[in-house]
Image (cartoon, rainbow, N blue to C red):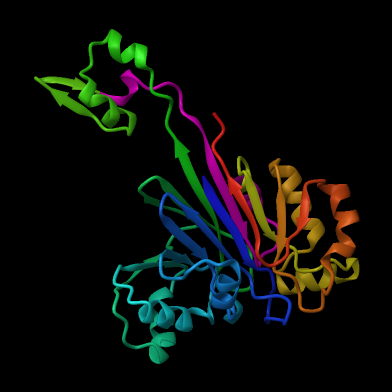
């Protein structure tokens, strides 16, 4: 099971009823946060989740509404007596920018590790899941992210017995581990069926529509995408500032054939995104004008 929570849905500045855009996912004991603007800690509190177990923070880019909440978040983690290392992932300049922000959080009881994205597309692999970063089209260097959880094939008991594989090897082979017993090698493909469908969440904000976004969103169980403007007359402004309208996000969701689209990163002037959803859903019916705290539990399908 993958827990997903869109902590905040605002762009540019936090509002009394809308925190800045941030997404948190929890899987297999790991917590991954994407972006950390001002107010992210409050959004976490409102959700009832703790910042202490956050293992990875990914940054799309370094505009203030996506990273200004980091120093306070680090201090809160330190005050909670965290000692485990924290991994930060982001575009080039990550360590320099975070080091500058840390002038107000200079002493922490845990190590900060940095992984800077150096390619147009780059994959970071962890135990049980991957984070795929892909470049998007904003007025500064900016990336979208997909969290991908692969799932191996089902263990085939009959094959294991037929091949006389020792029972003590079964659980290891099921985890994808190669085993050797009495000079014989047993490999997972001997007992595992075809790979099963895993889980995938794709997230992007602060960008114009691109083919790479559609390509990375394909196969996603959930697509979280910027819908900064709903007013049709703001199409020119979206192009000028390299942002996206709700209708453009819907067209990408339709092209990627995702099951569901959550819109986020609304302009402060967009008071009621729901007012525009009738037209948005004409493009992509499974569109949702997400509000702060919108959550989902994504489960594997056998």
Left or right of 126? Residue 250 is right
Q: Position of residue 127 (x, y in %)?
A: 35, 48
Q: Nearer the viewer, residue 298 or 248?
A: 298
Q: Position of residue 235 (x, y in %)?
A: 84, 67
Q: Is residue 120 above or below residue 297?
A: below
* Range of residues picked out in magenta: 187-215
Q: Is residue 269 above or below residue 175?
A: below
Q: Residue at left 47%, top 43%?
A: 149
Instruction: Judge whether residue 82 is colored magenta.
Output: no
Which quarter of the rendering shows the C terminus? top right
Q: Give how far across and how far down residue 66 sits, in percent.
A: 57, 75
Q: Is residue 154 left or right of residue 298?
A: left
Q: x and y percent of residue 154 in the render?
A: 43, 25
Within the image, what quadrant is residue 60 found in?
bottom right
Q: Residue most toward the front?
A: 48
Task: Tell me if 228 is positioned left or right of 70 in this view.
Answer: right
* Quarter residue 5 falls in: bottom right
């Amino acid at each position: 099971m993958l827990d997903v929570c869109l902590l905040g849905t605002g762009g540019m500045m936090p509002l009394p009823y809308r925190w800045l855009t941030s997404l948190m996912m929890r899987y297999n004991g790991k917590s991954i946060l994407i972006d950390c603007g001002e107010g992210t800690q409050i959004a976490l509190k409102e959700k009832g989740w703790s910042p202490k177990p956050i293992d990875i923070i990914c940054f799309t880019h370094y505009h203030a509404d996506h990273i200004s909440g980091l120093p306070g978040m680090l201090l809160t983690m330190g005050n909670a007596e965290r000692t485990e290392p924290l991994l930060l992932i982001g575009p080039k300049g990550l360590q320099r920018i975070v080091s500058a922000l840390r002038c107000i959080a200079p002493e922490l009881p845990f190590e900060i590790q940095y992984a800077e994205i150096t390619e147009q597309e780059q994959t970071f692999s962890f135990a049980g899941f991957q984070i795929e970063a892909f470049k998007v089209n904003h007025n500064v260097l900016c990336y979208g992210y997909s969290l991908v959880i692969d799932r191996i094939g089902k263990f085939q008991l009959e094959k294991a017995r037929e091949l006389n594989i020792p029972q003590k090897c079964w659980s290891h082979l099921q985890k994808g581990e190669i085993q050797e017993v009495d000079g014989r090698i047993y490999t997972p493909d001997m007992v595992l069926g075809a790979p099963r469908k895993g889980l995938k969440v794709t997230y992007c904000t602060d960008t114009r529509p691109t083919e790479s976004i559609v390509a990375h969103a394909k196969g996603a169980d959930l697509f979280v995408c910027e819908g900064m403007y709903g007013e049709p007359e703001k199409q020119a402004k979206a192009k000028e500032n390299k942002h996206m309208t709700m209708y453009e996000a819907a067209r990408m969701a339709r092209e990627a054939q995702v099951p569901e689209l959550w819109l986020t990163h609304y302009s402060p002037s967009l008071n009621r995104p729901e007012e525009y959803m009738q037209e948005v859903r004409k493009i992509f019916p499974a569109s949702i004008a997400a509000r702060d705290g919108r959550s989902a539990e994504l489960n594997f399908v056998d």
